[in-house]
């Protein structure tokens, strides 16, 4: 009986430490050190409605918007993950051909790889600068904006998420770029 009581006390102590105290400390640390990220990095419209999170990709399908990387999970944050298909699987080739058709490419034209290949999580909010520049003529035409202005916006919204010393490449956040485009054409 004594062993059972000791075991129950240890279990209760472990539950309190692991399920209450540790998450509370992490939550408090996040709220103090990086509150914007801890609260989801949500972008809001002027009237307070949420536009999206800069940490998660979302589907943009209209020609007037920059399109994100394809998502194996249809941009559903509750089901993040890759497709688990091998690189030689025929479904990946079919998806790539469909995306190439969506961009209106002719045989032999090159497209940045991140516009036809999904990220590991399916929720990567960034595209490469090359992918943004590739889409710029379509977006400029659809919005009736000069290509130079769209290119300036791409440059203004370019960021390096990690140190370049460790291989971080400049990328563009699709949501912030599209919000900036909407502000230009209001």
Image: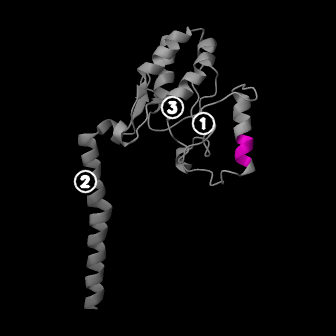
Q: Disc 1 versus disc 3: distance between alpha carbons?
A: 9 Å
N-terminal of the pair, mark 2 or mark 1, is 2
Q: Residue 95 at what x, y percent from top left?
A: 71, 41
Discs 3/2, front: 3
Question: In the rendered view, would you say 47 is above or below 74?
Answer: above
Q: Disc 3 versus disc 2: distance between alpha carbons?
A: 36 Å
Quadrant placement of the N terminus: bottom left
User: Which residue is nearer to you in this view: 13 or 40?
Assistant: 40
Q: Callout 1: helix, strand or loop?
A: helix
Binning the other alpha carbons within 10 Å of mark 1 as few (below 14), some (14 to 19) or many (20 upward) gives: some
The residue located at (28%, 52%) in the rendering is 26
Which numbered dot is residue 20? Answer: none
What residue sits right under mark 3 in the picture?
Answer: 128
User: Which residue is nearer to you in this view: 144 or 42?
Assistant: 144
Q: Disc 2 versus disc 1: distance between alpha carbons?
A: 41 Å
Numbered range of the magenta stretch: 91-95
Which numbered dot is residue 113? Answer: 1
Q: Are marks 2 and 1 in contact (CB under 8 Å)?
A: no
The residue located at (46%, 26%) in the rendering is 176
What residue sits right under mark 2 in the picture?
Answer: 25
Q: Residue 65 at what x, y percent from top left?
A: 58, 22
Question: In the rendered view, would you say 77 is above or below 186?
Answer: below
N-terminal of the pair, mark 3 or mark 2, is 2
Q: Is residue 12 magenta?
A: no
The residue located at (26%, 78%) in the rendering is 9
């Amino acid at each position: 009986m004594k062993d059972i009581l000791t075991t129950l006390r240890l279990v209760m102590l472990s539950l309190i430490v692991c399920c209450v105290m540790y998450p509370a400390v992490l939550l408090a640390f996040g709220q103090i050190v990086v509150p914007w990220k801890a609260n989801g990095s949500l972008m809001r419209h002027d009237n307070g409605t949420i536009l999206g999170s800069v940490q998660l990709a979302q589907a943009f399908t209209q020609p007037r918007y920059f399109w994100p990387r394809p998502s194996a999970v249809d941009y559903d944050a509750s089901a993040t993950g890759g497709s688990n298909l091998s690189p030689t699987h025929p479904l990946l080739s079919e998806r790539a051909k469909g995306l190439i058709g969506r961009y209106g490419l002719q045989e032999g034209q090159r497209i940045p790889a991140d516009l036809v290949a999904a990220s590991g999580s399916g929720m990567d909010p960034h595209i490469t600068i090359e992918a943004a520049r590739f889409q710029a003529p379509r977006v400029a035409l659809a919005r009736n904006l000069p290509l130079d202005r769209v290119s300036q916006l791409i440059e203004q919204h370019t960021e390096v998420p990690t140190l370049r010393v460790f291989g971080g490449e400049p990328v563009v956040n699709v949501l912030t770029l599209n919000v900036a485009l909407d502000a230009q054409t209001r």
